[in-house]
């Protein structure tokens, strides 16, 4: 039987997954428009476009939402399908570190372009 605390935690997880999905839809739509506007342009123009503060902010928001959403989704898969406690713990840690590393690397790359490094 589920305790009150575990039901609250599951509801929070459910809501976070939906919130990140909505953020991905909104930021993704903006990024698709941005990518379509960059059709057949040169490297300098693309860097300048990514360096624009609004575009860089949307890119960073998309990266963070995507990595967070992936982490939440993989967490559910691990909880549902990995039944060995030690393996489940290792999978959860790998999931957290991989998603965090991907988010940090992506945000760092956007910031390097945006700040002109």
Image (cartoon, helix red, strand yellow):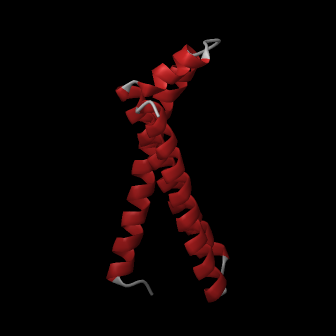
Q: Is residue 29 above or below residue 21?
A: above
Residue 30 in the image, given as x and y percentages of width and height: 46, 27
Quadrant of residue 55 within the rendered picture: top left
Residue 66 in the image, given as x and y percentages of width and height: 51, 48
Q: Is residue 52 above or below residue 71?
A: above
Image point (39%, 49%), residue name: 19
Q: Nearer the viewer, residue 8 or 66?
A: 66
Toward the front, the furthest residue is 117
Image quadrant for the N terminus? bottom left
Q: Is residue 62 above or below residue 75?
A: above
Image point (47%, 55%), residue name: 68
How many marks on residues? 0
Residue 115 in the image, given as x and y percentages of width and height: 40, 33
Residue 108 visible to an observer of this rendering: yes
Q: Nearer the viewer, residue 66 or 12?
A: 66
Quadrant of residue 52 within the rendered picture: top left
Image point (54%, 26%), residue name: 32
Q: Is residue 79 above or below residue 111?
A: below
Residue 75 in the image, given as x and y percentages of width and height: 55, 68
Q: Nearer the viewer, residue 49 or 17?
A: 49
Image point (47%, 20%), residue name: 48
């Amino acid at each position: 039987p589920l305790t009150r605390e575990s039901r609250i935690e599951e509801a929070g997880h459910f809501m976070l997954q939906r919130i990140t999905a909505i953020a991905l839809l909104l930021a993704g739509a903006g990024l698709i428009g941005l990518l379509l506007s960059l059709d057949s342009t040169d490297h300098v123009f693309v860097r300048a476009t990514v360096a624009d503060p609004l575009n860089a902010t949307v890119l960073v928001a998309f990266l963070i939402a995507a990595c967070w959403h992936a982490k939440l989704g993989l967490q559910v898969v691990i909880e549902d399908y990995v039944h060995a406690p030690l393996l489940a713990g290792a999978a959860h840690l790998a999931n957290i570190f991989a998603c965090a590393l991907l988010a940090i690397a992506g945000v760092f790359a956007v910031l390097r372009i945006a700040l002109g490094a």
